[in-house]
Amino acid sequence: MAQVLVVRAHPFDSSVSRSMKVLDAFLEEYKKTNPDDSIEELNLYQVALPEIDRDLLTAWTELGKGTFFDQLTQNQQEKVTLFDQYTDRFLEIDKLVIANPLWNLHVPSRLKSWIDTVTVAGKTFRYTETGSEGLINTKKLLHIQANGGVFHGQDPASQYIKTIFGCFLGIQDCSELFVEGMDHDPENADSIVAAGIEKAKELGKTF
């Protein structure tokens, strides 16, 4: 039985969001094919997400110098605890599904904040004499992204996801599904999304 983490990076559900609509189609098929898998959905717009700020940077510096955790400020303790919870949960999963829109050529800021919580030296990657080395090469990744324009996977957002999880953290088994061109060709937007849904269903049988 695999543990699957589904990261929803959109404030709207599938009634409005095209990326969520395609994700839902994938999940429906995946659950039929893998009824025993454990699926956890993380809606980034419904949870508290720590940002790397002065409190976190100062807390990490103090902890690195040997300061006891309970000697940190209350804000520092809360942010470190929340940050570590996301990191630890990520380490436990077998499969990761990320679904997001392309906003201004990048991922939503909340997705970036979550990715920061799972990009942690000594836990998901490490520094070596020859450079960084990913430590999570046994996991699988599916990235679903809806684009108003057509980029064929060359936009900064999808390249960022591929670089972080593939090159940097070490995931070798990466799949991508881009549903794109709906704003560029609005007359065919429904058919573009429909085609994306069919591709998502097929991935749901094999991921």
Image: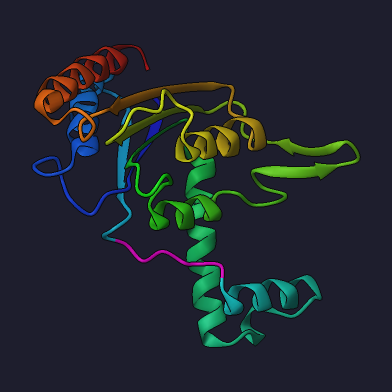
Q: Nearer the viewer, residue 155 or 193?
A: 155
Which residue is at a point 91% across and 40% down the rendered structure image?
129
Locate residue 177: give its quadrant: top left
Which residue is at a point 58% across and 79% down the rendered structure image?
55
Locate residue 202: give its quadrant: top left
Q: Nearer the viewer, residue 185 or 157?
A: 185
Q: Which residues are magenta?
A: 47-52
Whether 88 is drawn above or below 181: the answer is below
Q: Is residue 59 left or right of residue 2?
A: right
Q: Nearer the viewer, residue 155 or 203?
A: 155
Q: Quadrant of the N terminus?
A: top left
Locate residue 27: give its quadrant: top left
Whether 7 is drawn above or below 94: the answer is below
Residue 136 position in % (x across, y down)? 62, 34
Residue 13 position in % (x across, y down)? 15, 46
Q: Is residue 130 left or right of residue 180?
A: right
Tag count: 0
Which residue is at a point 54% across and 42% down the rendered structure image?
91
Secondary structure mostly seen in magenta is loop
Magenta stretch encompasses residue 182: no
Residue 149 position in % (x across, y down)? 31, 33
